[in-house]
Amino acid sequence: MRKIIYIFVIMLFVTLQSCQDDGAGLLDKAESGDITEEQIFSEGALAKRFLNNVYSRLPKGYFRFGATNPVYLGVTTDEGQQAHLGLLTQALWFNTGTWNAANPSELPAWKYAWTAIRPANKIIENIDKVPLSEQEGITEASKLQMKTEARMLRAIFYAELLKSYGGVPIIKRQLTQFDEELYTPRSTFDQTVDFIVSECDSCALILPANNRVSDPVNFGRMTAMAAKALKARVLLYAARPLFNDPENTNRIIAGEYDPMKWERAAIAGWEAIKFAEENDYSLYVDSDPKESYRKLFITRGTSEEIITYIRSSKHRECEARQLPLRFHNTGNDKGGGFTLPSLSLVESYEMKNGINIYQNGSGWDPQNPYINRDQRFYSSIYYNQSKYKTYTFEIYDKEPGSNVTPGVDFFTDVVNTGFYLRKFIDETINPNNGAAFHNHLFLRYAEVLLNYAEAANMAFGPYNDHFGDGKTAKWAVDQVRARALQPQLPVGMSTDSMYVRIKNESKVEFAFEEHRFYDCRHWKETKPFTEVKLQTITKKDNGSFKYGEAVRSRVFRAPTMFLLPIPIDDISNAKYIQNPGW
Amino acid sequence: MKKIFYIILLFLFVLVNIIQAQDVILKGIIIEEGTSEPLPGVNIIIKGANIGTPSDLEGRFSIKTKENDVLVFTCLGFQTQEVKVGKNRVLNIQLKPSVSELEEVVVVGYGTQSKISVTGSISTIKTDELKQSAVVNLSNAIAGRVSGVVTKMISGQPGNDDSKIFIRGLGTLNDNSPLILVDGVERSFNQIDADDIETFSVMKDASATAVYGVRGANGVILVTTKRGKVGKPVVSFSIQGSIQTPIRTAKPLDAYNYALLKNEAIRNDNNGLAPGNENYYYSSDEDLQHYLLGDSPFTHPNNNLIDMFMSKTIPQAQTNLNVRGGNNIVKYFMSLGYLYQDGIYKQYKNQDYSTNASYNRINLRSNLDFTISKSTEVGIDLNSSFRSRHNIGVSSRFSGESTNPEYNNMFELLMRQPANYSPLINPDGTYGNGKNATIYNPLQIVQDGGYYHLNQDVLQGTFTLNQKLNFITKGLNLKAMIGVNSFLATEQSLSERPFMIEYDKYGKYTNNVLSEQLAIINSGTDNDWQRIYSEISLNYSRKFGDHAFSALSLYNQSQNFEKSQVPTGYLGFVGRATYGYKNKYLGEINVGYNGSNQFAKGHRYGLFPAFSLGWVLSEEGFWKKNIKSIDFFKFKGSYGEVGNDKIGGYSYYYIQTYNNGNANFGNYNFGITPQSYSGLLEGKLGNDQVTWERARKTNIGLEMRLLDGKMSFEGNYFYEDRRDILLDFSSVPMVLGIGTPPGNIGRVKNTGGELELSWNDKIEKFNYFIRGNISCAKNVIIENGEAVQKYSWMAREGQSIGQHYGLVALGLFMSQEEIDQSPTHIGNVKIGDIKYMDLNEDGVIDEYDERPIGNSNIPKVQYGATVGFEYKGFDMSVLWQGAALFDVYFSNGAVWEFRDGGNVFEHHSGRFNPEDPSTWANATYPRLHDGNFPNNHRKSTYWLKNGNYLRLKNIEVGYALSKKLLSKLPVSKLRFYVSGTNLLTFDNQMTFDPETENERAYNYPQMAQYTLGVNIQF
């Protein structure tokens, strides 16, 4: 028995002996060169790199939906149509009304914005910790500059949330996964607007006015102009019918009804215009005025850019995705042209004389529909018999009963709209292997003008010179029209008919720039989401074309779909109030 | 009178002997009962004296004894015999082979135990069974042979055909793979030569696995390799040749039928109209005529790619030479194995290199045991394996698929390239290609497409020291071990692409398709890692009368070093105590205490205890008196906790780190002349609370042997509650703005049982046996951290792991009226498209209507049965194996028509043709679409197939030459055999093997195999 006790003592001893060691060394993670939380704000260079991360999350524009064969956000409005219905993009879900809180995976506005707000908050909270360093260019001033850039970027992402969802929780610091603040309820719509506006106001005092001129290597960073323009944009959103609705008492998705909100927006817009004029911002004009609008999108660093997502490199995505297959070897075997402009868009381009095509006196010929149109039409749209380089577009079917061969750019297995999208295409490159600049103009001066026009028209009327400097609503629209070589708007219109003209101007000017998807919602217009018109073109034996139209209907449930649904998971996790109807 | 005298003399003699109690030298020979075979290496011990000697090569022994000593003869595989010395000076002993399983010893964690005293749940496979299937990869030999194990053989690619193995089904939402130890060190067993294996055991319950602590929750497989035995060298040689043939290959339609269906699909998508223009893909009547007649093979090819490129008979050869023996100083087992497996592609001429898949393997093993002194033994094991795997080049890519050569997209290409796609060789001698720029030409791939070659070198060494500490107390033993594993994989690939040119059906050349790429050779290290394992243990085992007692105390540590990874480390303490009273009442305590460097300080250690009890009723007096037919009856039960730390290797979840930005996120550009600036991204948050999963396991079992051991039965019921499963917090609001680290939030319950039944008997010289086993396991997710779902049927909680989710198909739309009255489906739905159930009745078919459909993808039931006999040197065995209660989902190019420019198959012939009402009622496939059609091509019950299968897994017939015949030959054993593997499969799949897992089904096919072999022993 004694021996057994001895044995146990020995065994215990062996065990304890090895236990004492605690396995330190063996169980410690080896040095791996990873950057850790402590390091990031102890070196200026690392902090700067972290700020780049926030910039990189600015909306990139262009291809919203689909991975290999993507389409634009515009195909979910009457701007255009996804050509290949066989490609299962999120756009199909939108157009068939089958999107919901469980599936907006490819329009990740919610998650995406929070992913950008977090690093911004992290910088705002911690940048003061960064030690000053002459070598790394870290001064008190540069730290303040970085902090303010982060605040301005954060304001942009809150504005993105606002336009899609209404009021959102306002989180001003970086959270841990156990933070109570994660469950902050949604702020009211007005609180969210106020937060963005006050951030813009403070940032405008600190940021440089125009670094394109003063500091060209830092072009692309946040400016005071960006702050002023964003403020005007957000105040305009707040004044629009969806969010400023006497009938709506849901304060999370709509503000306190106040017709004076138009005036507030108009003043902010006027201030932005003044600031722009004083600081060298203007509409871009090319040496060939006819080319101004087209070249705006393929020229870098124009005077019109206020907030731009600067792409890391040149690419040919627009060329390869917008042109039919015969011009390149990229993508689906049935031809490119995934995003096709619609007749609903094309009919909005006025005649050169400034008159809507369907109006008396326009001089428009339905069987010769593409002559004498707004210059922006030619800059944005490829139509039947127009040219890409030396090639002619042949977008027609054969007239039934004729012996004609359908055109090479007409496909039997896609939705032919009758058009291809020219906007954004750089025709000087080879779509097979070339590359061009395609930066997304997230906020440009033309928008500042039209935003002001919309607010001023509603606040003061179309022709009322409220500020005494001639900057009426009409004046602002005419600025944009002048660059497009369109005549000035007529006098004598009512506020309502002016509103129609401004909306149309916006539709034409910003086609496929991701505005209409939100604007029409804010205007509570449903037609842009329920139907899209297509041009039908057939060729007769005698070589002439016959133009007609067809309508594709889409599913849209108003008012539910005016706002996007907050993802279902967050509704159940954070108990947010869901937008009505979802 | 004479008799009386003799008796007195005898008495005297005895008396004198007793008085003198003289030492006598006892000599003898030990032979196997019923034969004249001498038995070397039998241990002869004087009972109670701890003095002993082994028998020599001729079975002779000599030992100093006293007359009243008792000698104990023990030898593995034979019944222990006790003989009183008495007056004998010469003893000829015959040892009976142990037929009774009572004598059997089983391998347990860090040791062995007699089978009778085991209270945990352990199953073993006999090594000759492992050899039977003539498989190359041992993981493929265990299906159906052992209870409690689920296997799934995903692919048949030579050298890349590991089966997935799950012990007692699935218990966690993370990695479910068991811990595998070979000779006590964590090593893979897949590529070990079957001839080298001594034991194969599967540890299932907490009692058996608790000693592995944090690594035991998924079960443990212990493999030991053969070691030397005292005796003259026995040389064994085996050689076998096999022919393999794919069990199933895809059945694409020929060019004519392809064109017919393509036309139909185009018309379907085009409102019933033929396209007005000259559509490349639309075949005119004239085209169809050419396809039918095959009279214009260049413009209208009809390539049967499967037949052209896939061979039906693939040779394989395997041989092993080993020698086993030993003496009092050294015992040895040395083995050399070689394997060659050919690939499936038919060979086309290439002067420079082979493109065919193949696999070569050389295994070398040397296990040496040195007896240094009476109390000290040293073991030195060396094992190396050199494997090389060859395959076609990387350019066998099919549109949109991965470029990873190991995906073997060649199969996808052969399966999915339409028969009329293009001529393989154009009239001008160039390689052909079609319109779709991303599809390659299979002929070019096998002739000039390059190759992929992988060399894997495995070196393993184990050094063991065994020191008896009898000077402290009897039965105490010290063991120390160091094991080193080293793995190096180097790869070489050659990719090239000769010019390919489109030659279309109009006889026109278009040279814009794929440009030439010159040969590029790449080589590098694919992977390399080292593992160093060491352990030191004290073992104590002794009997005091009726009380048997054993204890184990062990410390181990291991470190892994893997290419470009931070090294990981484990350490563990193991304790075990067992007690048995008269082999009647058994008790056991097992404890594992582990540390892992994957966790933050303070969370690194965990204690995993297990308890088990056994009661052998048949040892009770009342049983022995009353129940004669049941020889052995044991109840056993265990309860304990075991851990699982397979939470994604090298993930230090407790630390948050920052990553470099990329072109999409992080990096950004500033400046009118843009200048790129690198960015930093915040990695997942750290969670310093992260620790391992913990399983609470209960096992209740019953063992029986009946009718003199002819029949045996074992049944086990288990219940497992796995907690703290590491999962991402999906319930953290996205407002956080970053990925959350995983937390120990998941919980899964797993219950099931196993039955094993066997019958051995003989009718005169006809020996036969029947063995069967069935296992079932069903798991339920109790908690997975998911958000509360909008509709109850969307929840994953309450369902099984791997449960399929999808829409419920209600059949095909038969009329426009039906479509109009139905909820909104996606896309331009017409008659012949799939109709779905609108679960939430909101008038729209969407994600909210997806619910659990069918079973999960892992079988809930797996079973196997073997029947065999032996008669006059002939032997035969048949293994049936099957699985049930699981569903298989195939999608994309494997099933759907014209997917991504792909093919149509036999099963598309049964489609719903809107133009032909006679097809409507009995359509087995929806209306065809030229390309992807979102409504039909999504996961639903329509595409789910019952996975149940029953397989004739193996038949082996052998003949061993009788001793009589052999006496004229210089061999001691000679056996010929033929065997067949995967001979028949009964299931519900159309094209693919039920074990295939990939939804796209582009795996190398599973193989049936026919083998002829011979074993010779000298």
Image (cartoon, coloured by chain):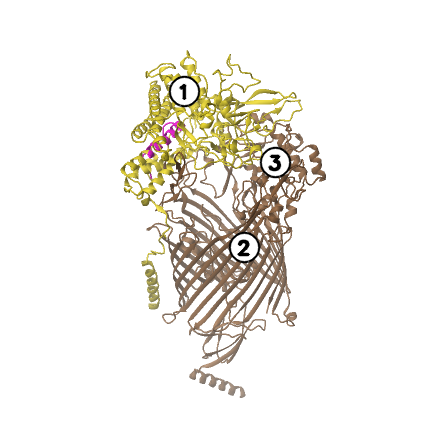
User: Left or right: B436 with respect to A119?
Assistant: right
Kindly report which numbered mark, 3 or 1, lies closer to the viewer in this rendering. 1
Chain shown in brown: B
Task: Name the image quarter holding the C terminus of chain B.
Answer: bottom right
Quadrant in the picture for residue B816: top right
Displayed quadrant of residue A458: top left
Q: Is residue A206 magenta?
A: no
Mark 1 secondary-structure assignment? helix
Residue B283 can be seen in this image: yes
Identified by mark 1, the residue type is Gln
Q: Are marks 3 and 1 on the same chain?
A: no
Disc 2 crowd rating (10 Å Cα; few below 14, some 14-19, many 20+) is many
Q: Position of residue B832 (x, y in %)?
A: 60, 31
Q: Is residue A166 magenta?
A: yes
Residues marked 1 and 2 touching at CB (< 8 Å): no
Residue A552 % position (x, y): 54, 23
Residue on which the image places disc 3: B925
Q: Earlier in the sequence, mark 3 or mark 2?
A: 2
CA neighbours of label 1 inside 10 A, class few (<14), some (14 to 19), many (20+): some
Q: Position of residue A211 (x, y in %)?
A: 35, 31
Pinpoint the chain carrying mark 2. Answer: B
Dot 2 amino acid type: Ile
Q: Chain under label 1?
A: A
Question: Alpha carbon of mark 3 to alpha carbon of mark 2: how far?
Answer: 37 Å
* Residue B717 relative to residue B391: left or right: left
Mark closer to the observer (1, 2): 1
Highlighted magenta segment, given as a residue range: A149-175
